[in-house]
Every structure is written in structure tokens, then in C-alpha cells.
Amino acid sequence: MPRGAFLFFILLVLPIALAACSPEPTPTPAPTPTRHPTRTPIPTATSKPPPTQIIPTATALPTNTATPLPEPTQAAATQPPSQASSQNAPAGGGLTVWTMAPLIEYFKNIAPSTLAPIARPANVNPLTGLEVSDPALLQRRPVLARIGNDPNARPIHAGFNQADLVWEEMIDQKNMVFAVTRFTLVFLGQNGSFRPLRSARAVNASLMPMFDGVLISSGGSDGTRYLISQLPWKDRNLDGDLQNGAICIDGTDWRTRVLSSVEHVQDFIAAKKQSGAPTLRGFQFSNDAPNGSPANTIALDHKPWPVYAAGVIEWRYDAATGKYLRFVNGAPHNTQQYALNGVWGKGCQIGAATSEQIATSNLVILNVKYEPTDFVEDTLNSYSAFVDLVGSGAAQVFRDGAQINARWERPALGDFIKLVDANGNEIALKPGNTWFELTPLGYAPTIK
């Protein structure tokens, strides 16, 4: 081959051979798709709330068939609820949508109580009017336990008859139609186990200053957790997901598996040097039955109370015990009690259980204002609700088989709720436990 032709051949073939021997280039990975958040971003708290948007509503109570309200997104309240009437909507009608910053500013404003204290012996529980075996029990912080009310939770409810007070409120709304109810059990004069712990809501930011207690819950939305993290009592918030030494686990169902006890919570906060003996005004009590109209059955049996998931609630007076017994969908609503031990943060060791029907010496219906917030509570994009427990509103007190029309009053967050009659005189509760139903404005239970 001529020299020139050979060189031409080499120059032609060599690049092809080198390319054939080179490794294949690694393909550039495709970028991971960005997940769009479903929860409302949490704004930084500011002292100056943004403008208010009013959502028009009908004058009738909302139901599942009501005209849908716009989704709350950008609006916020310009005044704390304590400056507005608890019985009237803002000027022009409608509901105020609360954003995070005004809620934080409102719930941080905890002033000392302006109400006169009630004198009582050192061994008398201010929440029940009953004597306790050991006055040291009353020198503790009340424990506020957040308990779920999913239908599958009711067969294993625990602690309701050991609690001094129970508060039941509607939670998780879309267009002011609520999903279910949830409970806050308040323990002071008795020990006991309680189950199942679930997440807190904004209502707990309203209840905590009244008791200066410790809140125990399990889990929570980003919005509620952030709200609580900005409040003065944040160190006494025991979220079992974040402080699992406060709880133990039984089973695998996340809706029912988290338990704790009053004794353990008291030991837990003592180890953290958060124990205390708050001054609790409590309620007036009397064994004398007041005059009132007969009330043998009180039922929360119609909307907007979430009767589908929460069930039709009936309280039936039992003359033999002098208490109202709780029924759900016609069946007794029972509560358990047992010794609770184990490795805290891990598996529970549960003693033999005793079961009895939930009963209360006093049933109190409080008409309160529910307003929407703009932060999401669950994967269904249900919004949290603000429950207005400051100011005043209509109430009904049931004891000894009788109904007393009343009014609730609470001037500020640091004050205890008072129940007064038409003349402004404080109504005496029957010594024993009390159950509060937080019903929406204008709601009238069925009374027989």
C-alpha cells in the first residue's frame, strides 16, 4: 500500500476504534418531581394582624346541605374574639377566618384572673366539690388529656369516670361542616389511666390557661404544633410523638394505641421540674337540688353536631345514682380503668380492666362560637376550628334530673368559666364530675 494511502487509512479507522472501546456515558438522572405541599404555610407571628375577610353565611345553622363557603386561605381576624360578642357575627354577618399570627397573639395574652377566689377547705377539690383522701393530690398541676372519638376508639375508651371534667368539642371542618368530636379530660383529684391519646387542637390553647396544667396528646398538625410552640406554657405540652417517654403503646392502630396515666404524667413533669400547685378558682357546689324544669333525657341528635361520625348522643338521668348516663346511638358508652405499667415509650403492660358506663353528676351545654382557621389538620385537608371560650354566651345546666337555663361568663383567658342565672347569681353545681358539651351558637339539644 502506498505510504500516503496507509496514513489516510490510519486516520480514518483509529477514531472509530477508540469510540468503540470507550465506556458508554452515564445518563443524567431525571430530576425528582417536586411535591406540592397540601398544608397552609405557617406565617411568622407578628404583632399586627393582616386585614380581615368576612365570609358571608346564612342566618340558619350550617348543615351538610348548606351553600359551601369559600376555602379559607388569605384572610385573618383584626380583633381578638374577646373584643367581639360571643353571640353575634362580625358586622355585616359571616365568619372570621383566623390565620396563625393573630391566633398566637391572642393566646399569648394570659393575664391573672380577675375573678374573686372561692374559699373552701384544703381537702376539697375545686373542680368537683368533693373531699379527697389526700390533700396533696390537689397540690398538683391538672392533667389535660386529649382523647379521640373515632368510632373504633369507643370500645376501648379509658379514664372518663376518673376525670374531674370532660370537654367535648367539634373538630376538623370543611366549609364549617365538622367531621367528628374530640375530648379533653381534666384530672386533678383522682389518678387513673386514659386512652386513646390523639392530637391537640386550638381549643386546648384556650383551656390550658384556665387550669395552668399540663397537656398530653399524641401527634398533631404542623399548624397546631407551631401555635402551641409559641405560647407561654409550651414546655408543659407533652406530645407523645415528640416526648415518647410520656406514653406507652398497645397495638398497631395509630388511632387507638397510645396510652398514659395521671400518675406517670405527674412523675414525668416532676423529673422535668415542671410540677406546681396552681390556684384554681373552680366552681360553686351545693348538694341542694335547684328549681328547674324536668330533664330526663338530653340528646345531641341533629346537625351541625356531627351525628354521623360522633354518633347521636343521649344523656339519660338515672335516679338511683343521681347521675346522667351517656349513650351513643342508643347503646351505653362505656369507659375502662386498669393499672398501666411497662416500658414507657414502648410497650404497655395493662392490668385487669374494669368497665362501667360513662356517668356525670352535671351536664353543661355551652353555646360557643366556632370560626375557621386557615391551617390544615389532616390528609383530607380539613381545617382546624377556633372555639371562642372567652366572653359570654347561653348555657344550660342539668343536674338532679332538672334543667337550669344559664349563661356562661369568662372575661379573659386567665379566668375560670362561671355559670350564672338570669339574675347574675352563680349557679351551684352538684358535687361530683362535670361534662361540658361545646355546641355551636343557637344549637338546642332535644330535651325530654
Image (spheres, grey):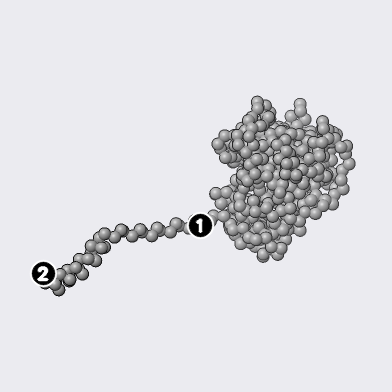
Identity, as a three-letter code, of the amino acid under mark 1 = His
The residue where tag 2 is placed is 1
Q: Where does the C terminus fall, quadrant-wise?
A: top right
Question: In the depicted view, which residue is nearer to us: 385 or 208?
Answer: 208
Percent position of residue 213, x then y: 75, 44
**Labels 2 and 1 touching (C-beta < 8 A):** no
Q: Which mark is residue 140?
A: none
- The correct choice, above or below, for 68 with respect to 170 in the image is below
Are there few (<14), some (14-19), or many (20+) residues within 10 Å of tag 1?
Answer: few
Query: Residue tagged by mark 1?
Result: 36
Check the image and name the residue furthest to the bottom. 4
Residue 441: percent from the left, percent from the top?
70, 49
Residue 337: x %, y % from top left: 68, 30
Q: Residue 375: x, y in percent?
A: 61, 54
Decide if residue 1 is in sight here.
yes
355 over 292 or under it: above or below = above
Q: Quadrant of residue 308?
A: top right
- Count neighbours of disc 2 (C-alpha within 10 A) and say few if under 14, some if 14 to 19, many if 20 or more: few
Secondary structure under the numbered disc 1 in the rendered image: loop
Q: As displayed, is residue 52 above or below residue 167? A: below
Q: Which circle's residue, 2 or 1, is located before the other in the chain? A: 2
